[in-house]
Image (tube, rainbow, N blue to C red):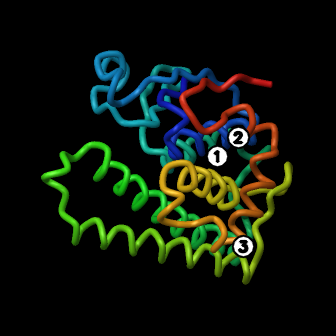
């Protein structure tokens, strides 16, 4: 399989980390959706990261859908989603909030990095900033209520995605969501980022290298 997209995208990175934890081998091609459009279009005309090119050549997109496919490939040997219904409900709750935080942070980055300054609509920026902070508040509360595993062999998709998203937020907008206000998120992410699967796919413009 080939994973297409840059590891500075939390969506690409959550797939790269998860594929490793599911023991699914893959190759990574770090292609930018901005600077590498012609190359990306040749693989996926929609130019959406992450893109996964399956062994049979089928092209999948959207991190959640790619991870659903990965779960099917890894079953029944491994899974990052709890089978127990209450535990799965909790994981889905955390995932939804973490992905909402991710979406709002990406929107803020695009507003300041892509949209011309004279076209910026401050009420919209204020709204998505408030949504980002609210999502992070909810994640911190969820961790206070029920900590997420961050050890190899016990970390699940909620734990992976939460850590990946928090690293992304702190890399691109730490002034909006200061780490000092979210000690539980910070501690969980610090532990997760020490796992070999996270280290092999670091946030940034590098390329995943199998250990």
Q: Depth check: give the residue in front, 194 or 43.
A: 194
- In the displayed structure, does residue 81 sit left or right of residue 29? right
- The residue that label 3 is drawn on is 87
**Looking at the rendering, which quadrant does residue 82 occupy?**
bottom right
Disc 1 crowd, CA 10 A, few/some/many (<14, 14-19, 20+): many
Q: Measuring 36% from the left and 57% from the top, which residue is drawn there?
A: 108
Q: Earlier in the sequence, mark 3 or mark 2?
A: 2
Quick check: marks 1 and 2 in contact, CB under 8 Å? yes
Q: Measuring 58% from the left and 66% from the top, which residue is drawn there?
A: 178
Q: CA distance from mark 3 to mark 2?
A: 20 Å
- The residue that label 1 is drawn on is 71
Q: Secondary structure at mark 3?
A: helix
Q: CA distance from mark 1 to mark 2?
A: 5 Å
Above or below, 184 against 48 in this view is below
Q: Position of residue 156 (x, y in %)?
A: 73, 57
Above or below, 91 against 55 in this view is below
Quadrant where the image shows the C terminus: top right
**Looking at the rendering, which quadrant does residue 188 occupy?**
bottom right
Q: Secondary structure at mark 1?
A: helix
- In the displayed structure, does residue 135 sit left or right of residue 153? left
Disc 3 crowd, CA 10 A, few/some/many (<14, 14-19, 20+): few
Q: Earlier in the sequence, mark 1 or mark 3?
A: 1
Q: Secondary structure at mark 2?
A: helix
Q: Depth check: give the residue in front, 134 or 60.
A: 134
Name the disc covering residue 74, or none.
2
Q: Position of residue 22 (x, y in %)?
A: 73, 41
């Amino acid at each position: 399989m080939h994973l297409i997209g840059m590891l500075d995208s939390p969506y690409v990175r959550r797939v790269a980390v998860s594929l490793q934890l599911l023991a699914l081998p893959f190759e990574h091609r770090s292609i930018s959706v901005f600077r590498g459009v012609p190359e990306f279009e040749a693989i996926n005309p929609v130019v959406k990261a992450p893109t996964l090119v399956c062994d049979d050549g089928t092209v999948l997109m959207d991190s959640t859908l790619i991870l659903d496919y990965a779960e099917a490939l890894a079953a029944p040997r491994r899974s990052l989603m709890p089978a127990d219904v209450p535990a799965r409900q909790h994981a889905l709750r955390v995932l939804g909030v973490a992905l909402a935080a991710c979406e709002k942070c990406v929107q803020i980055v695009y507003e300041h990095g892509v949209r011309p300054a004279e076209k910026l609509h401050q009420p919209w920026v204020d709204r998505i900033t408030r949504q980002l902070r609210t999502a992070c508040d909810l994640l911190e509360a969820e961790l206070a209520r029920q900590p997420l595993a961050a050890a190899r062999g016990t970390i699940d998709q909620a734990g992976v995605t939460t850590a990946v998203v928090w690293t992304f937020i702190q890399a691109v907008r730490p002034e909006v969501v200061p780490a000092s206000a979210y000690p539980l998120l910070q501690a969980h992410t610090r532990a997760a980022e020490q796992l070999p699967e996270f280290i092999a796919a670091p946030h940034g413009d590098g390329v995943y290298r199998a250990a």
